[in-house]
């Protein structure tokens, strides 16, 4: 009994402490925030020290801003920022990466710098308000050098937020001294006179999108035009830190710990005349930055416990679990487990109220683990199988076995099986050249319009979109779903997609738009590829690589559809295929023949009886003699 109690207690402590970073623990923490709000109620937010100014749909669709591309709004953002500083704002931060300067624009037809000096107001604004205005950089985006120079040393700060193991943003670790930290959050805290040196977790009480003081950008610009509006602007800005950011749906959004919390009633929130954007499932990045600053400034945070606190609690709960498992009837243990978990979560909730984040998984897991271990030991004693049970449970508690069990419960097994599929690469021809003449939002619109129609056809013909690769789509037939005739289905889909070209050109307003499709059939590895934290379902193998090589043949031969021999030979007899190339593709050791459907729409250039198609090592006359029926 003593030996089992010691083993059970040790196991409970070890397993309980290992649960500190479990992927589910963050979910429990967020639920504790929800319970805390239910008990304490939702406070009013007039005293919130941060104001968010959003570039939202209302602003972008307003009469004043609708004609202006987003990349040309720097002067307006400068006007709004200066107005807020003059209205009493402590500091201003921009959750925008000003990577483009209109001053660098040169008319491609004349070479004239038509927008020279356009961004001068924003540059002057940054220079005159150094140490009070900060602009953002990210892992992949940095401001234009002219803005960086104007903002000066320390004027460009990082807006990157870190996530927990479950992909949710909850914590921030300050870098000291705050005024010299690379993080925008720390710079704004320093300007607000906040002193904090430890990692902290913000404790929200409502959905941020409904509670943080908010003005649309168009509200700020409109309020400046009247004396009454300027007074309202002073009430919004005085003594506050201001953060500008994008509030468009699905743009710069993250999972945050406010996602289970109630909405603050609209009449209780500080909001401008234009109202607020619709609450999204995820939280806008600018709201998260604002909440970290506001939480630290108002003490609405939880710090890590003092060293030794969690081990001590794990010991206590492991002892409770071990004693309960040994001394109480087995039938009562589920009720004891529930009571122990409720008590443990209650202690974590009290810790939150005291500003300490006690990892909520440590205590209940320590109790339950010790209870399980001692219960199994008790069964072994009663059945006189102590040795075998101790040995079995000793193996059960081995670290490598525990890791393997945890992995099998949380994630599917990496890898997969081999099966025959058809792989397709569908590329928008001339996309790079087309995108040079379009604004960014028009590029996105064109790509999305094409992908939407193409994806509909792929799905209709039982295909699976494996991934989007820039302006191309990789699709698969016969994985993960079973397709009776994947070669025929893929060719039918390709033909229908090519038949949509006129419709796509009309939808996108791009007459030069064209498509190129390559198909190849063969065996691939199908399954989950990746690692512990990120994985995806995909296909891998030589068949995929060959399909991408076949696309280059389509480009050289100026056809919209190129299919390998492994696809062509499985097509029905009434599908006319013409051989367009024979040779050895890069990376392959054997020759391969490439075909197309001998239909006019499959050729990018008009054909006649005397035209020829380039075939790499030889030329093949484009006449009926080149039609190949591979089933005969």
Image (cartoon, grey):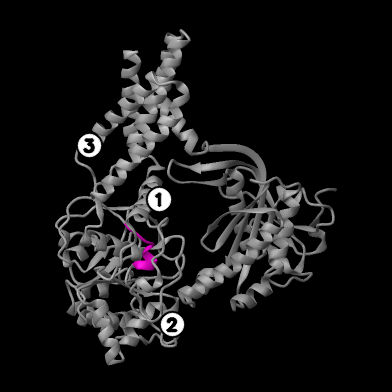
- Closer to the camera: disc 2 or disc 3? 3
Note whether 77 is above or below 168 in the view shown: below
Q: Are marks 1 and 2 in contact (CB under 8 Å)?
A: no
Classify the position of the N terminus by image quarter.
top left
Per the image, label 3 sits on a secondary structure element best described as helix
Label 1 or label 2, whichever lies nearer to me, is 1
Q: Secondary structure at mark 2?
A: loop
* Residue identified by numbered label 3: 309
Whole-number angstrom distance, CA of label 2 to CA of label 3: 66 Å
Mark 2 vs 3: CB contact within 8 A:
no
Q: Residue at x 37, y 55 (%)?
A: 38
Find the magenta span and give its range: 204-211
Residue 108, label in figure: 2
Outermost residue on the top side: it is: 384
Q: Of residues 456 and 337, which is closer to you in this image?
A: 337
Residue at position x 45%, y 11% from top? Answer: 382
159 is higher (above) or lower (below) than 607? above
Circle 1 sits in a helix, a strand or a loop, which is it? Answer: loop
Disc 1: which residue? 167
Real-space Cα separation, disc 1 to disc 2, in angstroms: 44 Å
């Amino acid at each position: 009994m003593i030996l089992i109690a010691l083993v059970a207690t040790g196991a409970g402590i070890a397993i309980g402490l290992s649960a500190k970073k479990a992927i589910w623990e963050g979910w429990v923490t967020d639920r504790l925030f929800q319970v805390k709000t239910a008990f304490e109620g939702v406070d009013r937010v007039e005293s919130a020290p941060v104001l968010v100014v959003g570039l939202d749909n209302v602003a972008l669709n307003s009469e004043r801003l609708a004609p202006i591309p987003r990349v040309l709004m720097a002067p307006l953002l400068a006007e709004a920022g200066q107005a807020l500083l003059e209205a009493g704002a402590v500091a201003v931060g921009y959750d925008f990466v000003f990577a483009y300067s209109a001053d660098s624009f040169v008319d491609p037809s004349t070479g004239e710098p038509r927008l020279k000096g356009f961004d001068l107001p924003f540059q002057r604004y940054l220079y005159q308000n150094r140490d009070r205005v900060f602009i953002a950089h990210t892992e992949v985006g940095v401001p234009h050098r002219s803005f960086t120079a104007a903002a000066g040393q320390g004027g460009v700060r990082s807006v990157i937020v870190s996530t927990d193991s479950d992909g949710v943003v909850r914590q921030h670790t300050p870098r000291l001294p705050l005024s010299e930290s690379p993080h925008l959050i720390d710079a704004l805290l320093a300007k607000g006179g906040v002193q904090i040196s430890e990692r902290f977790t913000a404790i929200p009480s409502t959905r941020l999108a409904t509670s943080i003081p908010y003005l649309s950008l168009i509200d700020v610009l409109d309020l400046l035009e009247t004396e009454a509006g300027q007074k309202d602007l002073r009430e919004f800005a005085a003594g506050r830190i201001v953060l500008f950011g994008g509030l468009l749906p699905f743009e710069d959004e993250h999972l945050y710990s406010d996602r289970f919390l109630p909405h603050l009633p609209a009449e209780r929130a500080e909001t401008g005349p234009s109202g607020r954007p619709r609450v999204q499932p995820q939280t806008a990045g600018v709201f998260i930055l604002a909440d970290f600053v506001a939480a630290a400034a108002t003490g609405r945070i939880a710090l890590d416990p003092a060293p030794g606190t969690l081990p001590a609690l794990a010991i206590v709960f492991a002892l409770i679990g071990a004693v309960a498992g040994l001394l109480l009837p087995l039938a009562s243990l589920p009720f004891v487990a529930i009571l122990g978990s409720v008590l443990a979560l209650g202690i974590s909730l009290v810790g939150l109220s005291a500003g300490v984040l006690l990892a909520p998984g440590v205590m209940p897991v320590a109790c339950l683990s010790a209870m399980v271990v001692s219960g199994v030991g008790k069964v072994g004693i009663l059945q006189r199988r102590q040795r075998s049970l101790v040995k079995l449970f000793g193996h059960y508690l081995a670290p490598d076995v525990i890791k393997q069990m945890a992995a099998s419960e949380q994630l599917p097994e990496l890898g997969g099986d081999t099966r025959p599929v058809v792989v397709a690469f569908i590329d928008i021809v001339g996309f790079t050249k087309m995108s040079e003449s379009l604004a960014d939002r028009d590029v996105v619109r064109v790509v999305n319009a094409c992908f939407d129609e193409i994806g509909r056809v792929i799905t209709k013909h039982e295909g699976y979109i494996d991934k989007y690769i820039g302006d191309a789509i990789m699709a698969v037939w016969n994985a993960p779903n079973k397709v009776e005739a994947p070669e025929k289905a893929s060719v039918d889909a390709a033909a229908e997609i090519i038949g949509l070209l006129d419709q796509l050109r009309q939808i996108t307003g791009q007459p030069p738009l064209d498509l190129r499709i390559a198909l190849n059939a063969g065996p691939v590895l199908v399954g989950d590829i990746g690692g512990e934290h990120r994985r995806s379902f995909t296909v891998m193998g030589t068949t995929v690589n060959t399909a991408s090589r076949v696309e280059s043949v389509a480009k050289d031969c100026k056809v919209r559809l190129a299919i390998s021999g492994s696809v062509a030979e499985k097509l029905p007899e009434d599908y006319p295929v013409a051989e367009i190339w024979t040779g050895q593709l890069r990376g392959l050791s054997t020759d391969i023949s490439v075909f197309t459907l001998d239909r006019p729409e499959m050729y990018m250039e008009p054909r006649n009886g005397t035209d020829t198609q380039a075939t790499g090592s030889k030329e093949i006359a484009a006449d009926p003699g080149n039609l190949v029926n591979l089933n005969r």
